[in-house]
Image (tube, grey):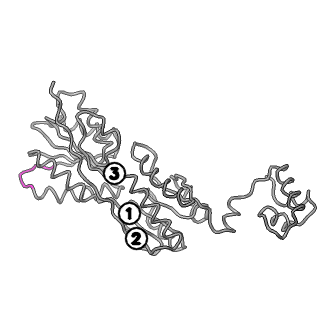
């Protein structure tokens, strides 16, 4: 790789003169600067982004850390982040995995938004202690360099249980999410509290993993144990859609024998029949607000903030008559 030493040697000037020329400093004459820039172009010199960011103490890049890239959940969320950052002269990169954790301490990014359950809180606090700015979307943290913006999971889960109870169900199954997920844990805690208000309801928990396959497996179990109409709350839409897939191959009818409600209102949920009941919120707003809070921390406009994204219920359709 070509360095400024190579340019200085070919131009017959000092390294500092090359540095001044490459950075447009008036300390170098126009003629000398033009000659140095021509040599840099000839040698195909590429400036070191890492060196430049260390000098300026900024990269104008923000990292969003995700547990994985699967599913249909992230599109609107990332769009909201990207638009807000772009309006403020920043770019967004999507990160996952241990190796990308070095981006913060090596100052390859100016700050990070965390929606990655595998990113340990202890490590995040260590970054914050060193002055790095963070916004968390999947846990509660209290630190001067950390803001948080969380979904109102408890309100959403309560709406879901009330919706199924109002359908008259005497049996309600809840398909859980992965234990590592903050959102899944909060939703389940709210469900367990909400069902206590309905003493006549039989309550059953079924393991799930926030993907379609686990929704299909949960549907299979419900089918095997079926004795009467049942209400099912899947803690995300991906599992609910997997359950739709399973029941489409059985004699049980969604909207009549089985009422299903999900959580997230992902786009595909609008198109399945009967229409999936779900807990709705603006993923675009969630992402935009996370970006806004992070920029406020970076630019020292505000102290850490704790925001919450409101949710609402979208009711499903009844089964279509054959």
Residue identifier under label 1? 149
Q: Nearer the viewer, mark 2 or mark 3?
A: 2
Mark 3 or 1: the one toward you = 1
- Which comes before the other along the chain, label 2 or label 3? 3
Residue at 39% over, 57% down: 286
Which residue is identified by label 3? 178
Q: Which residues are magenta?
A: 198-203
Report x, y in % for residue 261. 23, 44
Q: Please state the horizontal and vertical placement of residue 274, each as a whole percent of the image.
A: 22, 34
Residue identifier under label 2: 305
In the image, farthest residue toward the top: 322
Q: Secondary structure at mark 1?
A: strand
What is the CA distance from the residue labelled 2 to the residue labelled 1? 8 Å
Q: Are dots 2 and 1 in contact, CB under 8 Å?
A: yes
Q: Residue at x 23, y 43 (%)?
A: 277
Q: Main secondary structure of the magenta part?
A: loop
- Of labels 3 and 1, earlier in sequence is 1
Q: Quadrant of residue 108?
A: bottom right
Residue at the farthest front position: 30
Taking depth in this image into account, of 209 and 161 the one nearest to the observer is 161
Q: Is residue 311 magenta?
A: no
The kind of secondary structure element at disc 3 is: loop
Between the residue at mark 2 and the residue at mark 3, the CA separation in whole angstroms equals 28 Å
Circle 1 crowding by C-alpha within 10 Å: few under 14, some 14–19, many from 20: many
């Amino acid at each position: 790789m070509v360095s400024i030493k190579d340019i200085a040697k070919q131009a017959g000037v000092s390294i500092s003169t090359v540095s001044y020329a490459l950075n447009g400093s008036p300390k170098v004459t126009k003629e000398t600067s033009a000659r140095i820039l021509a040599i840099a172009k000839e040698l195909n010199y590429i400036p070191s982004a890492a060196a430049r960011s260390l000098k300026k103490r900024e990269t104008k890049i923000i990292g969003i850390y995700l547990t994985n890239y699967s599913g249909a959940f992230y599109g609107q969320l990332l769009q909201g982040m990207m638009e807000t950052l772009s309006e403020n002269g920043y770019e967004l990169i999507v990160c996952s995995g241990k190796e990308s954790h070095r981006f913060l301490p090596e100052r390859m990014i100016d700050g990070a938004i965390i929606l990655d359950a595998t990113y340990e809180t202890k490590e995040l606090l260590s970054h914050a202690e060193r002055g790095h700015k963070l916004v968390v979307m999947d846990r509660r943290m209290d630190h001067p360099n950390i803001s948080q913006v969380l979904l109102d999971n408890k309100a959403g889960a309560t709406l879901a249980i009330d919706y199924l109870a109002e359908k008259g169900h005497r049996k309600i199954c809840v398909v859980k999410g992965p234990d590592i997920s903050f959102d899944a844990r909060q939703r389940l805690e709210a469900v367990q509290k909400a069902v206590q208000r309905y003493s006549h309801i039989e309550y059953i928990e079924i393991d799930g993993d926030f993907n379609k396959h686990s929704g299909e497996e949960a549907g299979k179990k419900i089918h095997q144990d079926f004795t009467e109409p049942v209400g099912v709350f899947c803690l995300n839409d991906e599992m609910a859609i997997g359950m739709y897939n399973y029941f489409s191959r059985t004699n049980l009818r969604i909207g009549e024998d089985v009422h299903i409600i999900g959580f997230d209102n992902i786009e595909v949920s609008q198109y399945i029949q009967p229409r999936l009941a779900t807990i709705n919120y603006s993923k675009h707003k969630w992402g935009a607000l996370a970006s806004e809070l992070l920029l406020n921390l970076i630019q020292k406009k505000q102290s850490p903030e704790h925001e919450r994204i409101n949710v609402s219920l979208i009711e499903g359709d009844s089964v279509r008559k054959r």
